[in-house]
Image (cartoon, grey):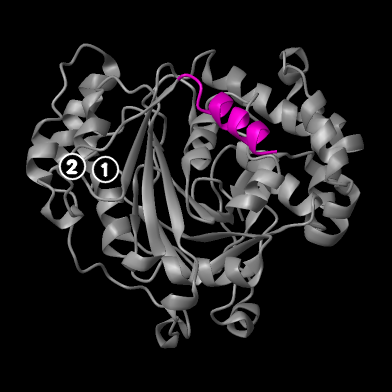
Amino acid sequence: FEKASTNLKRNQLKNAIVYSKPEKILNWKDFNHEAFLKKGSLQPETKYQRFLKLLQERLLISNMRKNYNGIPYFSCGTLIYNVETLPSTSVVITYHNEARSTLLRTIVSVFLRSPPQLLHEIILVDDFSDDITIGTDLLPIENVVVIRNTKREGLIRSRVKGSTLARASVLTFLDSHCECNVNWLEPLLARVKENHRAVVAPVIDIIDKDTFKYVAASADLRGGLTSFRIIRKRIIATEICRKLLHAGFRTPVIAGGLFMIQKDWFEKLGTYDEQMDVWGGENLELSFRVWLCGGSLEIIPCSRVGHVFRKQHPYTFPGGNGNVFQKNTRRAAEVWLGDYKYLYLRKVPSARYVNFGDITARLDLKKRLRCKDFDWYLKEIYPELAYVFFFFSSLLVYFL
């Protein structure tokens, strides 16, 4: 078993370099932030590089304050967590051509707002960025691990590489343009300790893409499905929220950018579908798989993380944005939707002609885990979706 596990790790880390730590290690507080940011100017050879150069000038003044505005949710401020009893976590952050200041802001906020004994490490996965020095410049920071892909792999396979190296029992996945708020970590860890199969997500606040101002989002949200590719929101009834107080509430799907999961549960579930490409649709597939195979998805209102939402991705998708998304969602539909697959194909007819690859391994996983049929999901987890299916035939994620 140990030999098989070693071979699996080698295979998952294929086409990647794991950098060795330098002799001189620095506490994150002693790291030269200004030098790191100033080094990041790029030659404007491409449209994205021009975008980066412009963005970096703006982001040099982005918020790296030590006093964020805590945003309480009902009784959150009265909660006291015994950090000595909580497990530690490995935070996995993937990036591709991310601006240095947004990436650094993410890293600093993790260190700043996490009890040291709960933060085992931050694993940075550089998905073949143009600037190879971003990761190597961050290597001297204590408890920072850096992996670089030797070719473009995308978020999905990059996250699997990061999780493979993780040494903590709990995995936390973050996007590279976030800001962790006050006491963001403890509520998540407390819940996964309580329920080993719970996959938990924070409330995702908004960081303005132009001003980088931190704006609180409603804490009373859950994930849902629609035919639109945009993020929508719906407030859960106030009386329900008040009953929940600081407890988490179930959600049919998660956005996918920010969540926490026990490492052994993540691996037993089959991590991500690595035949999916780049980004898009993996959150749907993971959400269905978690619910149908014995887990739960929950949003924890007392945990808050800000996120920069961009109107469009400044980087390219090998194969084209639309083709990648159709391939990924088609794979999810083929494996998990069962008889409801035709509704997806009716809504996205062009997906009929997409080569979605071999799904044998995922179907075997589904059988091995004795996962439920999609009828159960509609009945027990998201009965509203049955209405959506029959009247709108929708299948793309948003926040209701």
Residue 43 occupies quadrant: top left
Identify the magenta region. 1-15
Q: Main secondary structure of the magenta part?
A: helix
Mark-to-mark CA distance, 1 and 2: 7 Å
Residue 46, can we see it? Answer: yes
Q: Residue at x 68, y 48 (%)?
A: 287
Look at label 1 and name its amino acid: Thr
| 5 sits to left or right of 122 | right
Q: Position of residue 201 (x, y in %)?
A: 54, 59
| Screen quadrant of the N terminus | top right
Q: Position of residue 142 (x, y in %)?
A: 25, 50
Residue 351 vertical placement versus 260 (above, below):
above
Residue 392 vertical placement versus 205 (above, below):
above
- Circle 1 sits in a helix, a strand or a loop, which is it? helix
Which label number is shown at residue 102?
A: 1
Q: Residue at x 73, y 33 (%)?
A: 332
Q: Are marks 1 and 2 in contact (CB under 8 Å)?
A: yes
| 273 sits to left or right of 154 | right
Chain-order first, disc 1 or disc 2: 2
Q: Callout 1: 10 Å neighbours few (<14), some, many (20+)?
A: many
Q: Which residue is mark 2?
A: 59
Q: Position of residue 134 (x, y in %)?
A: 23, 31
Q: Residue at x 31, y 44 (%)?
A: 209
Q: Nearer the viewer, residue 367 or 69?
A: 367
Residue mark closest to the camera, 1 vs 2: 1
User: In the image, is residue 68 part of the stretch drawn in magenta?
Assistant: no
Which label number is shown at residue 225?
A: none
Q: Residue at x 43, y 66 (%)?
A: 185
